[in-house]
Image (cartoon, rainbow, N blue to C red):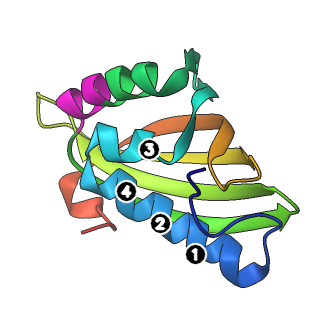
Amino acid sequence: MDQKLPLPPFTLDTAKQKIQMAEDAWNSKDPVRVSMAYTPDSEWRNRSFFINGREEIVQFLTEKWSKEHQYKLKKELWAYQDNRIAVRFEYEYHNDEGQWFRAYGNENWEFDANGFMQKRFASINDVPINESERKLL
């Protein structure tokens, strides 16, 4: 059976490792690469979107990154216990019109025994910023 190391239950070090792996994958802007960290039937709530399974993840991220240019993400551990991790994050991007945004949010992750994320619940707010205000270069 496939595994996505590190496996739960998480320690401080393995929770941070899992977060860094997720950050690296999302910053690649490769929807297929990102989707492979999730179970085939993964459940997401992303803002007001409800997404189920890898195919929908790929479709959602493909559309997202076609509109969010120069996307750059930073994730930070908030809490962890057993097979769950809570993350605080921010990312920056600009739209087709050149308006920059910084998005702030929180995610709650739940993993299966093989280290794949089976649930992801994200709350996100976008704030318009000037290009000169960017922090994530």
Residue in the image at 53% along x and 63% along y: 75
User: Residue 17 shows which numbered tag?
Assistant: 1
Residue found farthest to the left: 97
Give how far across and how far down residue 67 sits, in percent.
21, 28
- Asked whether the residues under the numbered discs 4 and 2 touch, taking CB atoms below 8 Å apart as contact, a structural biologist would say yes
How far apart are the two marked residues, 3 and 4, measured between alpha carbons? 10 Å
Front residue of 17/93: it is 17
- Asked whether the residues under the numbered discs 1 and 3 touch, taking CB atoms below 8 Å apart as contact, a structural biologist would say no
The secondary structure type at the circle numbered 3 is loop
- Asked whether the residues under the numbered discs 4 and 1 touch, taking CB atoms below 8 Å apart as contact, a structural biologist would say no
How far apart are the two marked residues, 3 and 2, measured between alpha carbons? 12 Å
Residue in the image at 74% along x and 46% along y: 112
The secondary structure type at the circle numbered 1 is helix
Residue in the image at 27% along x and 45% along y: 93
Q: In this view, does 82 lie above or below 98?
A: below
How far apart are the two marked residues, 2 and 1, measured between alpha carbons? 6 Å
Q: Which amino acid does label 2 sit on?
A: Met
Asked if residue 83 shows in the view, the reply is yes
Residue found farthest to the front: 1
| Residue wearing tag 2 | 21
The secondary structure type at the circle numbered 2 is helix
- Asked whether the residues under the numbered discs 2 and 1 touch, taking CB atoms below 8 Å apart as contact, a structural biologist would say yes
User: Residue 36 shows which numbered tag?
Assistant: 3
Closer to the N terminus: mark 1 or mark 3? 1
Front residue of 83/136: it is 83
First to last magenta residue range:
62-68
Give the overall secondary structure of the magenta segment: helix
Residue in the image at 25% along x and 34% along y: 65
How far apart are the two marked residues, 4 and 2, measured between alpha carbons? 6 Å
Q: What residue type is labelled 1?
A: Gln
Q: Nearer the viewer, mark 1 or mark 3?
A: 3
| Residue wearing tag 4 | 25
